[in-house]
Image: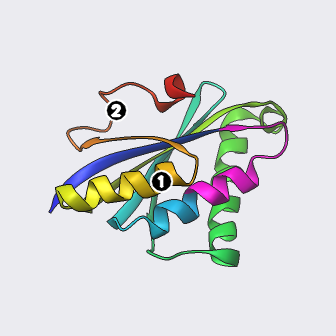
Amino acid sequence: MARYMVQIGTRSCCGKHRWPLVDMVETLAISGFEYILLEEVAFAGERVGLTLPLETHLSGDRAQALVDVILHRLSQSLGSNALCFTGNMTVTASAEADEIQAQESLTLIKGKGLSCCLEPHTSRRFHGGDVNSML
């Protein structure tokens, strides 16, 4: 098993960030990765550090509760009006998988219509560029 950095991004509309974020969290939770740790959420040029473990197969109300925590942290960092804007939202996570499983997970994420990047975990920063450049 190796540690990977996964970055998932989507375009998020004014005041409607909750459901795209729920979709990203649920997709990560069913992706087949193990020991997923949400590390960062970026929106409107700001990054909010997280250290939130993500249980596999998280969905429904429990996924929404986690998203509420993430949105609260974003709003604290960016200010209460910041989430009224439209922009690219990116979630960065680290996860464990073997190489084949990592590629299968990447295919699953892309199949859900989300932009994503995957690379071996070498540091906290993503060396391959920002997933938002793919949007």
- The answer for how far apart the CA atoms under marks 2 and 1 are is 18 Å
* Point 38% across, 24% down: residue: 129
Which dot marks residue 11? none
Q: Which of marks 2 and 1 is nearer the N terminus?
A: 1
**Residue 23 x, y percent position in the rendering:** 63, 58
Where is residue 47, by image quadrant?
top right
Label 1, residues with CA under 10 Å away: few <14, some 14-19, many ≥20: many
Which residue occupies the foreground of this view, 49 or 93? 93
Which dot marks residue 109? 1
Where is residue 33, by image quadrant?
bottom left
* Point 57% across, 55% down: residue: 24
- Residue 17 colored magenta? yes
Amino acid at dot 2: Phe
Where is residue 63, by image quadrant?
bottom right
Callout 1 secondary element: helix
Which residue occupies the foreground of this view, 11 or 64? 11
**Residue 108 x, y percent position in the rendering:** 44, 58
Residue on which the image places disc 2 = 126
42 vs 107: above or below: above
128 vs 50: above or below: above
Quarter placement of the C terminus:
top right
**Residue 10 x, y percent position in the rendering:** 62, 40
**Residues in magenta?**
11-24
* Point 47% across, 31% down: residue: 131
Figure coloring: rainbow
Which residue occupies the foreground of this view, 77 or 32? 32
Quarter placement of the N terminus:
bottom left
- Residue 118 colored magenta? no
